[in-house]
Structure formats: C-alpha cells, structure tokens
Amino acid sequence: MSRYRRANIDGGAFFFTVALADRTGDLLVRHVDRLRRMYQSVQTSHPFETIAICVLPDHMHAIWSLPVGDAAFPVRWSLIKSAFSRGLVHESSRTRSKIAKREKGIWQRRYWEHAIRDNTDLARYVDYIHFNPVKHGYVSRVRDWPHSSFHRYVADGILPLDWGGDMREIAGQFGE
C-alpha cells in the first residue's frame, strides 16, 4: 500500500481539489446548503481562513490559509467530507474495502493539494477557482455561478463584476 506524502507547512496556504467518486452527478450543488453548514462547523472547531472557494456539481476547489503552528488540513477535509456524507443516502454499491473503512463511497478517497508558493501563485489559483464554472461550461460569465467566493471578491472591491468576460460574446466574435 502506498503512503501519500502531504505538505507539512505550519500556517501555510494551500489549493485543494476535492471530488466526488461519481463525477457525473450534481450532489454538491443539490446539497450545497448542507455542505456549507458542515464546512462552517469544521471551520469553527478547527479554524482556517478560506481565501477562495468554488463548489461545482461534482467537485470543489478551495484555497485555505492555516493558523500559525498548524498544518492539519487532512483532518479538516476528513471532517468536512464525513460530516457531509453522514445522513445522505447513497445508492451505489460499496466495495468491501469501503465498508471496512466505513466509507459511503460518496467522495474520492484522495484529493489534490498544492502548497501556495508566493503571491503570484496565489493569484493564479484564485483566478483558476473563480473561472472554473465557465471552464466546465456551467455558465458563460463568472458572475453567474452562485457557489463561488467570486461574489465576495466583487463585494470587497477586489474584482470587477465583469471579470472573466462573457464567453457568449467571445464565441460570437469567432462566429461560433
């Protein structure tokens, strides 16, 4: 069995991609209020700052900043994933391995993390998070996706409402 190495940077900032096992559904946006409650509960009990976040139907991206002296983001993700899953009915059959590990099979076991190196790296990942709903074709404008920290960035005057443009206009310029 392979052992995954996670970055162990006290007080670091990290970009995450956390995905559902079934990448064809819409479980996260269908239950986005539940996800928000569980996320906020873990954030209260195990503090961290959410720099940026976007919840899509089958996965989510987030950038967290952890408190000084704390590198325990795996604990936080485990708590969020298990709290969200608890109480949800999941139809798919589970493998013996998932049953033994008390997993419902809702989430992919692993997630991807990247330690943010500097302000340029941070800006690139914040942009990636905010543009992701457009990239996946859910909306043609970033502002039209409701489950994103983009709206907080606009309210705080960090980004303009028209940031990212309108893919319909861009497609029209090329006759698409």
Image (spheres, rainbow, N blue to C red):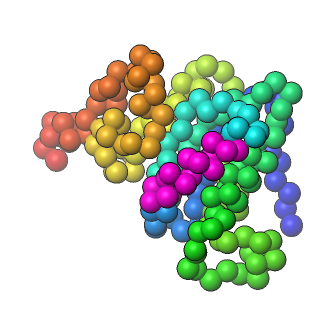
Q: Which residues are magenta?
A: 28-42
Say whether residue 142 is left or right of residue 44: left
Query: Where 5 sits versus 24, above or below?
Result: above
**Residue 16 visible here:** no
* Residue 67, quarter of picture: top right
Q: Residue 87, percent across and down?
A: 63, 68
Q: Judge whether 41 appears above or below 26 on screen.
A: above
| Viewer-side residue, 24 vs 81 | 81
Majority SS type along the magenta span: helix
Q: Is residue 82 above or below residue 167?
A: below
In the picture, measured across the screen, residue 170 lies left or right of residue 61, that is left
Quadrant position of residue 10:
top right
The spot of residue 22 in percent (x, y) is: 54, 68
In this rendered view, identify the residue nearer to me: 128 or 159: 159
Is 31 inside the magenta-drawn segment?
yes
Quarter of the rendering containing residue 72: top right
Number of marks? 0
For the N terminus, the image quarter is: bottom right
Residue at image location 41% in from the left, 31% down from the top: 151
Q: Position of residue 27 (x, y in %)?
A: 49, 63
Q: In the shown orientation, is residue 145 left or right of residue 41? A: left
Q: Residue drawn at (31%, 46%), measured in percent from left and top?
A: 139
Whether residue 62 is visible to the viewer of this picture, yes or no, is yes
Q: Is-magenta flag for residue 127?
A: no
> Residue at 35% across / 37% down in the picture?
142
Q: Position of residue 64 (x, y in %)?
A: 66, 34
Which residue is depicted at the point 82% across and 36% down? 71
